[in-house]
Image (cartoon, rainbow, N blue to C red):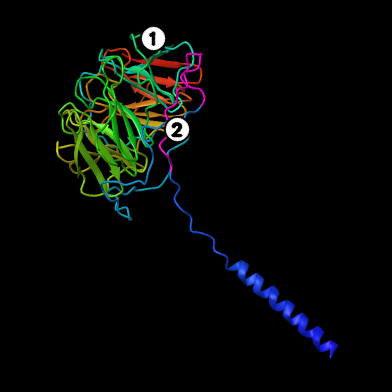
Amino acid sequence: MRRRMDIDLVVLGMCAIFIVTLACSMGGSSEPTESSTPPPTATTSMIRATALPGGSQGTQRVAPTETETTDFQPTDNLPTEIEPENTSSIPTADPPQQSTTAPDPQPTAGITATTFGPLEDWTKGAYYGEEITLFADVTGDGLADAIAVDYASIYVRRSNSSEFLLPFEDWTSGSFYGTHRTMFKDVTGDGLADAIAVDNEGVYVRPSTGSSFAPMSNWTSGAYFGTITTDFADVNGDGLADAIAVDEDGVYVRLSTGSSFGPHSNWTGGAYLGHLGTYFADLTGDGLADAIAVDNDGLYVRPSTGSSFGPHSNWKPGGYAGELSTHFIDVTGDGIPDAIAVDDASVYVLPSNGSGFPVPHQDWTGGTYFGERGNFFADVTGDGLADAIAVDHDSIYVRRASP
């Protein structure tokens, strides 16, 4: 009898262990919930005493980040209009690949520059932004100025055509930058580059007054940015930079009215983007920024008609892109943007004639020239030619576009 009771006790104990284990395994782990980020508060930290924008990281953004919405819907699949003929990567040592065919034997006449001159130190010390460093004419004197976007504020050092002047100036007296992109383009049409911050809930603009950036306003009253990239360029020729969103299903444009961006429209009617970058510049020289897709097998251009981007054509079969960066801006002085490839070995220029790139690329630096904090091209001297700018840890260096 006692043996039977002992067996019963063992069985009951095992059942209890099983029930406890089952209950633990079925315990409710709550569904993950999306965290709600409260609006950030303005930082009052000042620039550090070394004349270098940069210090302790602040947390201020243009506006609080909330649930991301867009006023256009991307498609799941990517029906790219451009299919690369090969998937080989950009060469790591040789110059950018050149086409063996040319649409025209001669480039456009009027070229005045053929190289970048000797290196010049324009800041005599470190000057860069914690968020980004950019170059644009914010004062309206025809010279691109050095703009350091810091977490605390936006600082400007004016160009006098031979250096970036001290003291640097605080143009926002507080933080202003976008979670998606920060740019400086003339969206008001007064000849001064304005501060633009692309955030989750809108595109914010602070117009330049020539000595500061005015109070911000939301120019889209809702989210507007591309899943691939967001850019600003004058695509309809009215002198105002427009908002361009490159999405997976098309290139969307919202034209600037001078005080806001109008309704969006799809200017490509389908996907159009480059695997190595998508850019907007007036390659045809008609005053309208065109859509440029840099792909592995070519450099494709869709000219702007003022209300859409026309059919694409390959302006550089075989591909042309820089290992470090690719740019489109006029460095030759003929008024038409050229293709610039910044490689580890050198800076190469491919002159445009308005309908293609008819001549081989040219080595404009004769050796390595790039900045550890970025490579830029802007007219800092006021001669109408974009100069090569390298932002390094210790200074900003300039090589002028020269004959």
Q: Which residue is depicted at the point 18% across and 31% down?
A: 288
Q: Main secondary structure of the magenta part?
A: loop
Question: Which image quadrant for residue 386?
Answer: top left
Q: Residue type at mark 2: give it.
A: Asp
Q: Which residue is depicted at the point 21% across and 38% down?
A: 254
Q: Which residue is depicted at the point 69% across and 75% down?
A: 16
Q: Are marks 2 and 1 in contact (CB under 8 Å)?
A: no
Q: Which residues are magenta?
A: 37-56
Q: How many marks?
A: 2
Give me the C-alpha separation between circle 2 and circle 1.
38 Å
x then y, percent, for residue 233? 24, 31
Q: Nearer the viewer, residue 355 or 172?
A: 172
Quick one: label 2, few (<14), some, or many (20+) residues within 10 Å?
few
Q: Residue type at mark 1: give it.
A: Leu
Per the image, label 1 sits on a secondary structure element best described as loop
Question: Which image quadrant for residue 283?
Answer: top left
In the rendered view of the protein, which quadrant contains the C terminus? top left
Question: Which image quadrant for residue 164?
Answer: top left
x then y, percent, for residue 173? 38, 20
- Tag on residue 195? none
Task: Look at mark 2 in the image and give the residue it sits on.
Answer: 94
- Tag on residue 165? 1
User: Residue placed farthest to the bottom in the image?
Assistant: 1
In the rendered view of the protein, which quadrant contains the N terminus? bottom right
**Residue 279 in view (yes/no):** no
User: Residue placed farthest to the right in the image?
Assistant: 2
146 magenta-colored: no
